[in-house]
Image (cartoon, rainbow, N blue to C red):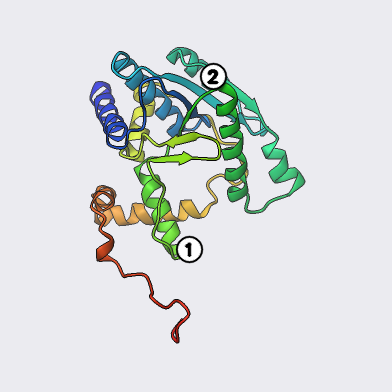
Amino acid sequence: MSKILQKTMLTHVTRAITHFSLIDPGDKVVVGVSGGKDSNSLLFCLNMYRRRYLKKVPFELHAVHLDMGLGANLDPLKEFCRRLEVPLTIKPTGIGAILFDIRKETNPCALCANLRRGALHNTALELGFNKVALAHHLDDVVETFLMSLIFNGMMKTFSPKTYLDRTNLTLIRPFVYVTESQVQQLLPLEDIPVIQNPCPANKKTKREEIKSLIDNLAQQYPDIRQKFLTSLHNFDANNLWPVKENKKGRWG
């Protein structure tokens, strides 16, 4: 089972990297590892990809963890990176104190994401790396689309590859073809550690509501995630409404 799942995960990652040109020879790739199941699994799979294609696509791989100051035990993460022989940088931040002690945020997720994003990008630049790999998987793609639709009235989700012209960094998401279920199956088979998230807001977000919604839909339509992926590849703007010609007209 381990070898079969390894092959499946490697195939998904390789296809994403190939389809969207995520990694080129000579790239220096930082993986933002929170210590959770997704980012640790991404580090494992990218390391597997790097070893498999060492001669064809040589690139550097480096793990970065942002210490939020919330008291997480990072020993399992350190040992995991030593086992993979991937360098790990732990960057101390005061993000936890800013959110919960200074600002006393009751809905901290948006601000937290912005602060972590900035800290991760700055750390990648300090290390001299040009790409940042994030562990968003197919379930995240679907969830983000539905959150944008339901809460903001917009049809959008994140891209597998995003260039940031202000920093000259490129964000890549090699897990966009991987499901959360596959990540869950990989953890015990490869002894991938999961550090408990000490954030007080963990599992209390709108994303958790949407995750439950998708799970319920999947009970009736088991292939809904793959159908959504197919729809992204087959998107045709002509199948949607045109832009309003007169946005300030009689009917608004």
Work out whether residue 92 can be spotted.
Answer: yes
Position of residue 248 measured from the top left corner of the image (x, y, whole percent): 48, 80
Residue 222 appears in the rendering: no
Give the camera-side residue of 106 and 227. Answer: 227
Q: Residue at x 25, y 57 (%)?
A: 220
Residue depicted at 67% across the width and 38% down the height: 95
Label 2 sits on residue: 88
- Compared to 55, does 149 lie above or below? below
Q: State the image coordinates of residue 61 (x, y, percent, origin top left).
A: 45, 20
Q: Position of residue 100 (x, y in %)?
A: 71, 45
Snapshot quadrant of residue 2:
top left
Relative horizontal placement of residue 250, taking residue 18 as reference (left or right)? right
Residue at position x 38%, y 47% from top? 141
Q: Give, as a three-letter code, the residue at label 2.
A: Leu
Residue 177: image location, x then y, percent? 30, 39
Q: Are marks 2 and 1 in contact (CB under 8 Å)?
A: no
Q: Earlier in the sequence, mark 2 or mark 1?
A: 2
Q: Residues within 10 Å of mark 1 (few under 14, many from 20)?
A: few
Label 2 and label 1: CA atoms lie apart by 37 Å
Residue 42 placement: quadrant:
top left
Q: Which residue is nearer to you in this view: 233 or 93? A: 233
Name the residue tied to disc 1. Answer: 152
Residue that protrudes farthest toward the right in the picture: 102
Instruction: Rate crowding at label 2 as few (under 14), some (14 to 19) or many (20 or more) other CA atoms within 10 Å.
Output: many
* Mark 2 element type: strand
35 lies left or right of 17 = right
- The amino acid marked with disc number 1 is Asn
- The residue nearer to you, when weighing 3 against 10, is 10
Residue 94, compared with residue 155, is above or below; it is above
Q: Quadrant of the N terminus?
A: top left
